[in-house]
Structure formats: structure tokens, C-alpha cells
Amino acid sequence: MPTDSPQAFDAAGFLASVGAAAQAAQSTAELDLVAQEHLGKRSALAGAHKVLGQLGDEERKAAGALLYEARQGAEALLSARRVEIEALERQRQLETDRLDLTEVVLSSVVQPISVGHAHLIAQTQAELEDVFVAMGFTVAEGPEVETDWYNFEALNIPPAHPARGMWDTFYLDLGDAETVVLRTHTSPVQVHLMEEAVRSGDPRLHAVMPGRCFRRDTPDARHLHTFHQIEGLVIDEAIAFVDLAGVIQTFTTAYFGPGINSRLRPAYFPFTEPSAEFEITCTICRGEGCRTCSQTGWIELGGCGMIDPAVLEAVGIDHERWSGFAFGFGIDRCAQMRHQIADMRALVENDVRFISQF
Ligand code: PHE
């Protein structure tokens, strides 16, 4: 009898082989191959089927039933395994999708969240305060909205004084015309401190006063209409101009480091006498001359001078016994010079690409 004789077909062996192969298959594609191999045209089962016709009736019936059952059994095994494999494949797909999503989230779509930091101007103010605190100064603050008296009159600038033109002023309309201003400098804080000191009975002061100021200026590479100053005030017995020059020089070296020089040039302020302008080497060009320093090699940081006796008298300090000096300069200007920022307007444009550099 030939091996593919239907009567000799080993149904149990066939089903065991289908079961083992189906179990080994890990994908529907592999399972299709198993089905093709065991049930397809070239399978032993199909071979046995072909010779059924050569058998007698009885034999053909028995053999046909055997082959039929074998096929049914094989198909049951294959479809049970197919259900398992499809579940496995769905599981694998979910895993892959989940991993893909994670990759996308981390790399290209969502930028890593960065923690913010203090703005460069705030950092600079804190550094300047540190330098002066190390030199023995205290830190004080005053209001941004001032009366005309604090911003001008107490500082020896009476109404209609020509020096008022030095500060293009924003006035607040609170009733009486031109009596309340957005402070144009931090010098009015000097007046508040002196008044307090007089009330406490001891006019001695060594303080710096940082804060925001306002001027009706058109912004350019070196000016903002809303900017920051730090004021300095020293009042004691026997204070002289050399003390002022010493403080300015010590500050310049401490904050800007070696290679940046300071110079004082004669100037005029109504509240100091004598007065000077305080300049430092332009850090953009290191003194060579450039657009930022208008080709001079120097950048003006602010003003200073010995407190005018008229200012001491206005707050009730005896100018025969006490003397002092004051200075005031731009915090934004310091940030600009320290970090070589060609155009100061970048400080307030809030472009994160710029701001995050500091
Ligand atoms: N307040 C002056 C200004 O802003 C600067 C200054 C301060 C000058 C203290 C002298 C003394 O222009």
C-alpha cells in the first residue's frame, strides 16, 4: 500500500504534527504556512484524498470519514491558535505604538520644560547691591510715583528752573496740573532717607537705592523710557570729594573687573556741587570707539557730586556740621556694559532666545 493510501493515513500523528507546528507559529503569516503545509494541495492529506476514488465503496466511506475528521480536527487546532496569535499581535502592536508615542513626545514635539530665571536686569540689580553691601552700604527703596517736591524742589530744582529740561518728565494727571510725576531718577529717595534720618536724630547715612525710573525719551541703543538706576548717598562728618572718587573707583573695579577704567568729568546737577559725570571704558569696543559709545570709547553710567548745602538745608540737616556725596547711575547700562549688549532695547523686547542667554 502506498504511503498516501487513505486507509493508512495516520490521523493521530497528523493532528499531533499540526498542533505542534501551530503552537510554534508566532504570527498569522507563519500559521498560514502551517495550514498550507498540512492542508494544502501538496499535503499528505490532499495526497490521500486523491486516491480515495480508487477504493471500493465501503473502504472509500471509512477512509473519507477518517480524512474528513482529520481535516476538521486540524482546522479546529489552526483556528484556536489563530485566535491566540491575533491577540498576541494586537498586544505587540499596542506595545509598539506606545513606545513610538513616547519617543515622539521626548524628542521632537514637546521641548523639554526649562525652569525660568531672574531677568538680567533683576540679576544685575542684585549684583550691584551685593557690591555696595560689601562696601558697607545699606539698601533702601522709595516710591515710583513722586510729588514734584521730592523729584525736583527738595533737590534744589524749583519750578521753572531751566535744569528741569534735563529730565523729560511724565506727569500724572491727578487734579492739580504737574504736581505728581513718575520719578525721573532715584534721587528723590535720597530726600526720603534724609527726612527719616533727621526724624531719628542722626543724619548719618550710607545707603544705596535701586529702582525703576521713567523719562519721556525715545528708546535707542543706550536709552529706555522705563529704566533702572541705583542711587548712592553718604552723609557724615568730614566727607570729601576724594571719598566719592574712591567709592566710584572701587565699585568699577569690583563690578566690571580689571581693564575697565572709570573717569569723572565736570558736569552740572542742581543738587550737587561740585558735580561730575561718571564714565567707564566702553566694553563693547574696549575703548576703541564704536556705534554704542558714539565713537568716544567711553560710556556714561551716571552722575555724582558733593551734596549741595541747599539740599541739606531743605530737609533740615546742618550743612556746617554734616557733608556728603551722592551718585546715581543706570542699572540697565551696567548690564549692557557687563554683557556687551550692543543695543539696550534687547533687554525689554522679551525675546526668549536673548533673555535665556543670561
Ligand atoms: N539723578 C541724576 C540723574 O539721574 C544723577 C545723579 C545722582 C547726579 C546723584 C548727582 C548725584 O541724572
Image (cartoon, grey):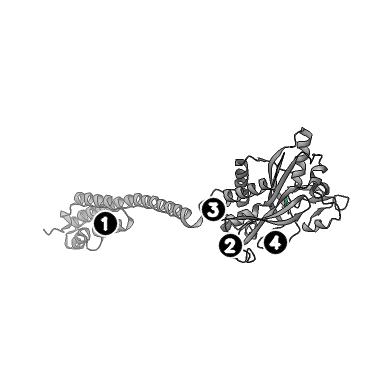
Find residue 300 and report its horizontal and vertical position in percent. Answer: 66, 58
Q: Of the residues shown, which amino acid type is indicated by label 4? A: Pro
Which residue does the numbered mark 1 point to in the structure image? 34
Disc 1 element: helix
Residue at 32% of width from left, 55% of height from top?
Answer: 27
Point out the tag, 2 or 3, that comes first from the N-terminus.
Answer: 3
**Does the beta carbon of the residue at mark 4 sit less than 8 Å from ligand 1?**
no
Which residue does the numbered mark 3 point to in the structure image? 258
Rounded to the nearest whole Å, what is the CA distance between mark 1 and mark 3? 84 Å
Disc 3 element: loop
Which residue does the numbered mark 4 point to in the structure image? 219
**Does the beta carbon of the residue at mark 3 sit less than 8 Å from ligand 1?**
no
Point out the tag, 3 or 4, that comes first from the N-terminus.
Answer: 4
Mark 2 touching mark 1, by CB under 8 A?
no
Which residue does the numbered mark 2 point to in the structure image? 287
Q: Nearer the viewer, mark 4 or mark 1?
A: 4
**In the rendered image, is residue 222 in sight?**
yes
Point out the tag, 1 or 3, that comes first from the N-terminus.
Answer: 1
Rounded to the nearest whole Å, what is the CA distance between mark 2 and mark 3? 14 Å
Along the line of sight, which residue is nearer the eye, 158 or 85?
158
**In the rendered image, is residue 186 in sight?**
no
